[in-house]
Image (cartoon, helix red, strand yellow):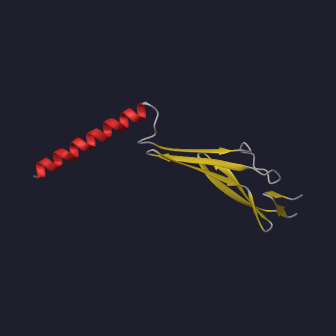
Amino acid sequence: MRKALLTALLILFCLFFIVAMKADFIGLAVLKTKVACIDNDIGERSIYIKSNVDSSSSFLINTKNYVFEDVCVDNYLKEYYCNGNNPEFVIYNCEGGCSGGICLE
């Protein structure tokens, strides 16, 4: 009984592997993790220009997309940027105030 169960599990594993290989061959992200980050202000951090960062991650056949927009919190600006393929942010103190995702001059 145990040998039959192990054989069945081995067959299922092999079938899954074959299907995954064929899916990868036609361009589906089945067994890969992919991460991407695009900074819409081209990496130049400017506290006077509102921008956003588009980020996506894929695992198996599931892809998630995220958008991080520059945002004001009181007189502070939370500006997003890409560090490689990872979205990150920095916080600036806007001396003239902050509105609509930019520091006021």
Whether 100 is drawn above or below 3: the answer is below
Q: For the point 50% across and 46% down, which residue is it?
A: 58
Q: For the point 82% across and 62% down, which residue is it?
A: 98
Q: For the point 31% across and 41% down, which residue is it?
A: 16
Relative horizontal placement of residue 79, taking residue 64 as reference (left or right): right
Whether 11 is drawn above or below 51: the answer is above
Q: For the point 43% across and 45% down, which residue is it?
A: 60
Relative horizontal placement of residue 103, taking residue 8 as reference (left or right): right
Between residues 74 and 24, which one lies in front from this camera angle?
24
Q: How many marks?
A: 0
Rendered image quadrant of residue 37: top right
Rendered image quadrant of residue 17: top left
Residue 102 coordinates in the image, percent (x, y)? 81, 56
Q: From the image, which quarter does the C terminus lie in?
A: bottom right
Relative horizontal placement of residue 99, taking residue 36 as reference (left or right): right
Residue 46 coordinates in the image, percent (x, y)? 79, 50
- Outermost residue, left direction? 1
Residue 4 coordinates in the image, percent (x, y)? 13, 47
- Outermost residue, top direction? 25
Residue 97 coordinates in the image, percent (x, y)? 85, 64
